[in-house]
Structures are given as C-alpha cells and as structure tokens.
Image (spheres, grey):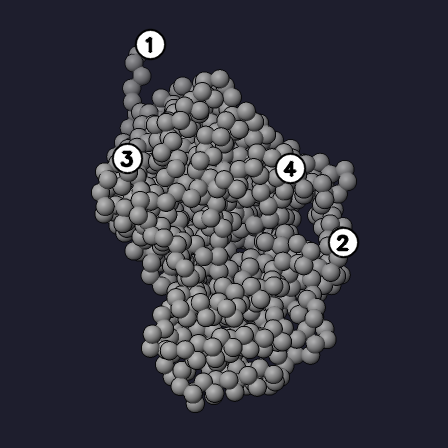
C-alpha cells in the first residue's frame, strides 16, 4: 500500500473572500452567490482591516453573517495557513454553524462539549490548518483553554459575550448553595461595608430592600485586608465549600483580590475586576486577529469593555440593512391597557389567553426569581416547560409539543424558532440583570447609559427569536413595569434599529389607553396577516425609512473614555498603581465633559480615590493624600441621587476633603443668589414677587412666567421658560443649578381637578429631560427631576407603568407654598448686610426658613409617577 499523498486544493488560492465563494459555489450546497451587502462587508475587511488586531462587523439577523464570517475564516486558512477558530455562545449555535459552513463548502471541525470527548482527527485537522474549528466561548475563556493555538478568532454574537468573557475572573459564592462560605467571606469583607448594612445581610429576614440591594465593598478597605480575604477564599476552595466555577475562578483571582471589586448582596457575593484582564489570557490575546460579529454593535464602548480591548475597529452595517430588519413583530403591552392597568389581577388571565392561542411560547427573563414567578403566575395549567439546558442539543423536544413554554433566564440569543416553530415571545422584566456588577451599575449607580447598548441588544435579539426570515412574524408580549416603562420611552425607541423603533411605536399606540378587548382584537389582526394588517404594515415600513438610530447623549464621550478605562483596569491588575492613577485621571477628564452622565463617572472617581489612598498609605507622600481627597469629593458630588456611595465603608483618605457644610445643590443655589445682583435691588425684587399672581391663575403664560421667577428665587443659575413657538414637546420651565441638578417643569395648571393624570402626560413630562439635554448640550445631572404640575387628584394606573424614574406630580398649591417659603428667606436675607454675606452665611439664613433646595426638593418629590402609592 503506497503512501497517502497530499492533494492540491481543487479550489485554488483565491484573491479575496468573494472570489473564494465563487469557486466554492461550483459544488457546495449554499446559495449561488453572495449578496451585495455581504460582498461590501468582506471587501471593507479585505482592503482596510485585514491586518488590524481587533475588527468588528455588524450584520442584522437574516443578513447572512455566518457566511461572511465563514468566508473570511476559510480565506485566511487557505491563503495564509492560519488556524482559525469560529466561536459561538452555545453548543446549539456551534452545531448550526458547523452545518452551515459544511453546506458552504468550508470544512469545519466541530469541537464542543467536554474536550476529552472530542474527535481527535477533527482536532488534528484544525491544528494543522486543514479545517476551521467551530467551538464555544467557554473553550477559550477558561482556566484551561483547549482552543489555545488559534491564529485568528471569529467571535460570533459578540454583543452577548460579556458573561462568557468575564466568567474566568468572576468568583461567585451563593448564600443558598454555599452558605458557610458565603458567611465566612461576608465576615472577611465586613470592614469594607457600611456597618449599618451588615445586620441586615446577616439576618434571616432582611426585608425586601436589603434582599434585592447590591452593595460595593470599598476597594480601599478590601485592599487593606486582601491577605485575610484571600486566606478565607483559599480555605473555602480547599474544603470544597464553593462551586467548581468558583474554584476555577480562584485560579485567576488568587493574589489579585486587591485589584478586584467585591459586590455583596443578600443572595450572593461576586469578586471580579471591573474589566476583564484579557490582555494576559494567551488563548484570546495571542491570535493575530480577533473578528467580532454582531447583529448590533452600537456605540459607547460597550464592546471594548466586554472584551477588555482598548480599540476595536468597526465595519458599519451595509446600506439598506441599517433600516430593514428580519420578519415582523407586534409588541403587546398588557399593563398599558386601561382595564388591565386598573386591575393587575386580570393581567395574568389575559396573558394566559394569549399563550393558549399561540400554543408554543418562548419566555425571556433576566433572572431565575422572575422565571419562577412567571411559571407560577402566567403559564396556563398543564403547560409543559423547558429550560435552555433541555433544548441545548435538540430544539425539537420543544417545537414538537403543541402546548409548551421554553423559559430562558438571562439568555436572549442562541435560540432560533422560525415560522410555525413559535409565534409568540414573552419578555418579563428589564434585561439588565446579568451578574452582580451589571445589577450594581444599573440599580445602585444608575449608570443606565453605560449599559444601554447591552440592554438594547438583548431586547432586539430577544424580540427576534421567533422571526428568523423576511416573511416570518411573531407577537412579542412585554411584561413588568420596568421594561414597559423603558420601551415606552421615545428616546429608547429612537436608540433601537429603525425597524424595531417603528414596531414599538405601533405596539405602544395599540395598547396605551385601549381596553384589553381592543388589544386582543389587534393581536388577532396581526396573527391573521390579512388586509387589515396590511395598512399597519405600510405604516411601519413608511416610518422606519424616516428613522435613523440615535445614540445616547453620552455615547461619544463613553466611547472616547473606554481606551483609558481599559488601560486603567489593566494597570490595576498588573499592580502598577502609579500608571493606573494616571489612566483614571484621563478617564475622569473624558467623562467630565457636559455630554457624559455623572453617575458612571462617580464610580471612576471613587476608584481614583481608592488607588490614591493606597499610594498615600504606601508612600506617605502628601500629593497622593491631596489627590485622594479630591477624588473623594468628586465621587460624592457625582453620585448625587444614588445610595451606593453611602453604603461603602466610611474609609477616609489622609487629609481627604471634609464634607461640605452645604449640599452641593444648596451651595450652587446660594452662590447663584449672591450673584443675582439685580434681584437684590428693590424694584427688581418687587417685580419678582409680583409673579406670584401668575401661579394663582389657570392661564398658561402667566403661570409659566411665575415658574421662571420661582426658579430665580430658588437659586437656579439659569431659569428659563418655553419660548412659546408652538412646540408642545418643550418644557414650560427649566431650573439649572450649575452641574448639580436640574428641575424641569410641565405645567398643566389649566386642567380641571376632575379626572385622572394620564399616561401620555407622564410620557411628555419625562421627555422634557431629553429635550432640555439637547438645548443645553449636556446630560442632566444625577437626581434631576421632571415635575408635572396638575390640579388633578387622581392618577390612572397605566401612568405608573410608563412614567420614568424622574417624573413627579405636584398640585399647584404646593408650588405657591414654595414661592412663599422662598420669599420669606429672601426678605430675611435682604435685611442683612449683603456686602459681608458669604455662601455659608446665606445658607444658614435659608436653612432657618426651610428654603434650601435640599429642604424643598422633597416637597416636589412626594408623589412619584413611577411608583404607586402602595409601594
């Protein structure tokens, strides 16, 4: 028997990926040729980004992303002899991808499941660059990666990869599963937490607030006790008191606890770096190129933070696909229907009715607790349920059932249910509950902007689980006040793909202030896909063509800052605290501009304080003491409106800035009042007092003028009203207290006291913040509020489901009382010597009259429109 001889590749060496497919198409089972948009993306990569280390390309679902990634992989394998690994989030997607590559004529080596079970011939072919490896993220991001020699990585569904990437560095200890280890670690971290918090975390009955709260252990205090914390974890691992995942994470985190952040909740403790240090993980960092593929990339640096890369070059979505999506979705908002909003007990029967009609349903929830509640409240009796694990290898176990629910937790990708496989998707809860770090950033810090792309991607991807081709259609039911309110916001709709934007508008209009019978009827029209729906379809198509996806107001600054964020995180992990402090300074400088949300900046300022504190302790140099104090004060100012800053241990740097006698908003108000020389003159002051009459009227114009004067008396550095150009979207008055807080007004004083405040009024008031941001060219400071002044005495239940968490309702008599309170303080202050008056002295006068912003703001916040009175 003769030697086996290597055959020359029958296809030959192509000049570019598109020519490669023309050669492959002669004998494969794929399409005859690539589409025009696929060709443009590959040409863009080949000409400009072939030799860049990190490149991202965006192609919406249905646009043939797998073929593009596969052709680039096969082109590099054939022309350069590169070992290419194509990574997917799940085994199921890996199986699908391998089959598609085979159909396209690209030889795959499917390497999934336990590595000991891999086909060694497939592994050898990949290692010899004879095939493209198709595997999962977990085989690269692992303490013992088996895909560790790739020259190129193709990372599919990159928008969903954060959990997979950070997992090796994420040490989780569950109270329920590993109570002893949890309590040991809580004790070790206790000096880094607010002492008043600890009894609640140790209690068997902590109360709802402490049961769901997420708290940051002070990194400075953790670093001071890092040796003890590490010994506690080391002992827990040695005694098998933690999960296997925690034991594997310990291999990455050991000796680096001082460089991690520790998040504590009643249910779990998580220790992880803010940004995963992927630069030291050779299986990911060594390849000469990493290509990130996603159906939605967005802006704001989310991709770079998720993968720990300072710069990822982007290939934009091709023309045409930036407007058109795949399939048609009809969004249904039961909690906006008038009768369902008024009586929440009838929401569940309505949802059950929808599910029964559909037969099969895929349910997307952010966490296990919500999934369990959904099964209990919303699933019809006798329905069979499946989890992600049960369909990992074969979706037919679900799709073969006539009445079944696939309930997924924090899983918005990786399940394809086209056509009759499934016609109904249910979203229950805002998808912002990944690990404790994500929950902390969203719930405790309130840094929604830095997570917006992640949330947007999950919503878009999740909504498309059952619309997998151009002719496909499925209904999407939205449950939970947080998600309902989020998707009802016009700025959030504008941040979505134009197709989703147009669909959401139709969905909100078809549910808001409608009866449940109306909503049911609209759903029937959609499901029938007949002539009645055709008219709505025309509206969606027409509207989507007029929309462009809008990035959030802080996205550009967040994108700019991410390079420095990654540099700071990597320096911390390398224990280079001097360079880390330099990088943090660049971060806070880039996040300090007017277009950036302050709450995320406050976290970086606090990290700057912790690093400077450690340097001051180790070097004794006064400059670090001063730097620590400066960062501490900056973090405190920028965290206004949140509680996280007060829950960390009261670690104070040597000679750190002392707490100001006045609240920052109070200080801004007193400074503005002292500078308002014109109002100190008798004639001008009397003119201001005369504006009180306008606040007693129902005529809009005098009332709005009264609000503007009231803002000046309150100490606003800028107080202005509606220019009255006929634009209803503009607020009636805006009070700017420098960079500390805004108060934005929507006046409905002309309304009758009968009836109820409706959802549309709340939406209008919430939208004024974004209108003002555009006017000011700045993002509203944390804890800024929108106030709806209305004489009505009742609020419709649907209003609570759409109001944003900064909208409050106040009745006109309260506004008049505030005017009188401020007048008394002004009269007292004017009777004193203005020439010698200081900010502190003026603050003391206003405090006596309960006229400081910190004293009167609570009166405007007594009736939040985003929380029912019973909550």
- Within 10 Å of disc 1 (Cα), the crowding (few <14, some 14-19, many 20+) is few
- Within 10 Å of disc 4 (Cα), the crowding (few <14, some 14-19, many 20+) is few
Residue at the spot of label 4: 205
Of 764 and 615, nearer the camera is 615
Ranked by sequence position, the earlier of labels 4 and 2 is 4
* Dots 4, 3 in contact, CB < 8 A: no
846 horizontally vs 289: left or right: right
Task: Identify the residue at horizontal 52%, vertical 42% (top origin).
Answer: 196
- Within 10 Å of disc 3 (Cα), the crowding (few <14, some 14-19, many 20+) is some
Task: Identify the residue at horizontal 52%, vertical 77% (top origin).
Answer: 824
Ranked by sequence position, the earlier of labels 3 and 2 is 2
Ranked by sequence position, the earlier of labels 4 and 3 is 4
Spot the residue most to the bottom: 683
Give the CA separation, mark 4 to mark 2: 31 Å
771 horizontally vs 601: left or right: right
Residue at the spot of label 2: 346
Q: Report helix, strand or loop for mark 1.
A: loop
Observer-side mark, 3 or 2, equals: 3
Q: Report helix, strand or loop for mark 3.
A: loop
Residue at the spot of label 3: 575
The answer to whether residue 681 is visible is yes
Instruction: Name the image quarter holding the N terminus.
Output: top left
Observer-side mark, 4 or 2, equals: 4
Give the CA separation, mark 1 to mark 4: 77 Å
Is residue 788 placed above or below 180 in the rendered structure?
below
Residue at the spot of label 1: 1
Of 165 and 844, nearer the camera is 844
Ranked by sequence position, the earlier of labels 1 and 2 is 1
Q: Quadrant of residue 330?
A: bottom right
Residue 543 percent location from the top left of the image: 53, 67
Task: Identify the residue at horizontal 47%, vertical 22% (top origin).
Answer: 236
Task: Identify the residue at horizontal 40%, vertical 32% (top origin).
Answer: 169
């Amino acid at each position: 028997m003769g030697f086996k001889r290597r055959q020359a590749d029958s296809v030959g060496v192509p000049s570019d990926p598109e020519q490669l497919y023309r050669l492959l198409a002669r004998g494969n089972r794929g399409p005859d040729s690539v589409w025009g948009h696929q060709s443009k993306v590959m040409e863009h990569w080949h000409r400009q980004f072939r030799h860049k280390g990190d490149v991202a390309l965006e192609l919406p679902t249905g646009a043939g992303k797998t073929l593009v990634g596969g052709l680039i992989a096969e082109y590099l394998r054939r022309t350069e002899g590169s070992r290419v690994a194509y990574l997917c989030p799940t085994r199921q997607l890996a199986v699908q991808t391998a089959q598609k590559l085979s159909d396209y004529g690209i030889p795959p080596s499917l390497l999934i499941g336990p590595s000991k079970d891999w086909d060694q011939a497939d592994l050898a072919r990949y290692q010899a660059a004879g095939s493209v490896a198709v595997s999962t993220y977990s085989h690269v991001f692992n303490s013992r990666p088996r895909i560790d020699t790739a020259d190129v990585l193709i990372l599919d569904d990159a928008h969903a990869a954060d959990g997979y990437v950070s997992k090796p560095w994420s040490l989780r200890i569950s109270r329920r599963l590993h109570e002893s280890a949890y309590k040991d670690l809580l004790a070790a971290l206790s000096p880094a937490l607010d002492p008043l918090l600890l009894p609640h975390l140790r209690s068997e009955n902590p109360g709802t607030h402490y049961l769901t709260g997420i708290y940051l252990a002070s990194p400075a205090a953790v670093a001071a006790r890092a040796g003890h914390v590490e010994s506690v974890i080391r002992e827990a691992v040695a005694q098998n008191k933690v999960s296997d995942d925690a034991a594997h994470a310990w291999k990455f985190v050991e000796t680096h606890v001082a460089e991690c952040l520790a998040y504590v909740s009643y249910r779990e403790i998580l220790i992880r770096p803010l940004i995963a240090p992927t630069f030291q993980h050779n299986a990911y960092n060594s390849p000469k190129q990493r290509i990130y593929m996603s159906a939605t990339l967005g802006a704001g640096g989310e991709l770079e933070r998720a993968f720990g890369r300072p710069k990822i070059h982007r290939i934009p979505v091709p023309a045409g696909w930036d407007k058109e999506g795949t399939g048609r979705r009809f969004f249904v908002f039961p909690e906006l229907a008038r009768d369902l909003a008024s009586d929440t007990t009838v929401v569940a029967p309505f949802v059950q009715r929808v599910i029964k009609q559909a037969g099969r349903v895929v349910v997307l929830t952010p966490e296990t607790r919500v999934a369990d509640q959904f099964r209990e409240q919303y699933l019809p009796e006798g329905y069979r349920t499946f989890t992600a694990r049960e369909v990992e290898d074969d979706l037919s176990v679900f799709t073969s059932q006539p009445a079944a629910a696939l309930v997924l937790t924090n899983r918005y990708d990786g399940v394809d249910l086209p056509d009759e496989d499934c016609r109904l998707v249910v979203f229950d809860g805002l998808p912002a509950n990944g690990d404790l770090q994500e929950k902390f950033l969203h719930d405790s810090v309130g840094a929604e902007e830095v997570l917006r792309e992640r949330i947007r991607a999950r919503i878009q991807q999740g909504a498309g689980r059952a619309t997998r081709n151009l002719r496909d259609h499925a209904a999407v039911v939205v449950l939970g006040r947080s998600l309902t309110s989020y998707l009802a916001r016009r700025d959030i709709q504008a941040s979505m793909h134009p197709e989703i934007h147009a669909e959401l508008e139709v969905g909100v209009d078809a549910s808001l202030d409608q009866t449940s019978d109306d909503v049911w009827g609209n759903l029937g029209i959609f499901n029938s896909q007949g002539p009645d729906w055709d008219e709505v379809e025309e509206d969606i198509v027409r509207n989507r063509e007029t929309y462009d996806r809008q990035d959030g107001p802080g996205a550009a600054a967040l994108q700019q800052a991410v390079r420095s964020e990654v540099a700071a995180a990597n320096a911390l992990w390398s224990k280079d605290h001097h360079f880390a402090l330099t990088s943090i300074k660049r971060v806070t400088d880039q996040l300090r501009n007017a277009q950036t949300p302050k709450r995320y900046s406050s976290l970086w300022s606090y990290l700057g304080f912790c690093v400077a504190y450690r340097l001051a302790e180790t070097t004794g140099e006064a400059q670090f003491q001063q730097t620590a104090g400066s960062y501490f004060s900056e973090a405190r100012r920028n965290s206004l409106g949140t509680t996280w800053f007060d829950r960390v241990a009261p670690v104070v740097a040597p000679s750190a800035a002392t707490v100001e006698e006045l609240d920052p908003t109070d200080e801004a108000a007193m400074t503005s009042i002292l500078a308002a020389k014109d109002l100190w003159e008798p004639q001008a002051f009397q003119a201001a007092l005369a504006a009180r009459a306008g606040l007693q009227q129902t005529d809009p114009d005098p009332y709005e003028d009264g609000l503007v004067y009231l803002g000046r008396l309150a100490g606003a550095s800028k107080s202005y009203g509606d220019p009255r150009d006929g634009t209803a979207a503009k607020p009636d008055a805006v009070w700017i207290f420098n960079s500390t807080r805004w108060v934005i007004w929507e006046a409905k004083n002309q309304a009758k006291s009968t009836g109820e405040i409706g959802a549309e009024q709340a939406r209008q008031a919430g939208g004024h913040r974004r209108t003002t941001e555009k006017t000011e060219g700045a993002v509203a400071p944390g804890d800024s509020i929108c106030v709806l002044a209305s004489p009505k005495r009742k609020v419709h239940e649907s209003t609570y489901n759409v109001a944003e968490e900064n909208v409050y309702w106040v009745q006109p008599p309260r506004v008049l009382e505030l005017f009188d309170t401020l007048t008394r303080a002004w009269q007292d202050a004017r009777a004193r010597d203005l020439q010698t008056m200081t900010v502190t002295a003026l603050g003391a006068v206003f405090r006596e009259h309960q006229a400081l912003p910190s004293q009167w703001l609570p009166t405007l916040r007594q009736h939040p429109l985003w929380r029912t009175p019973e909550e």
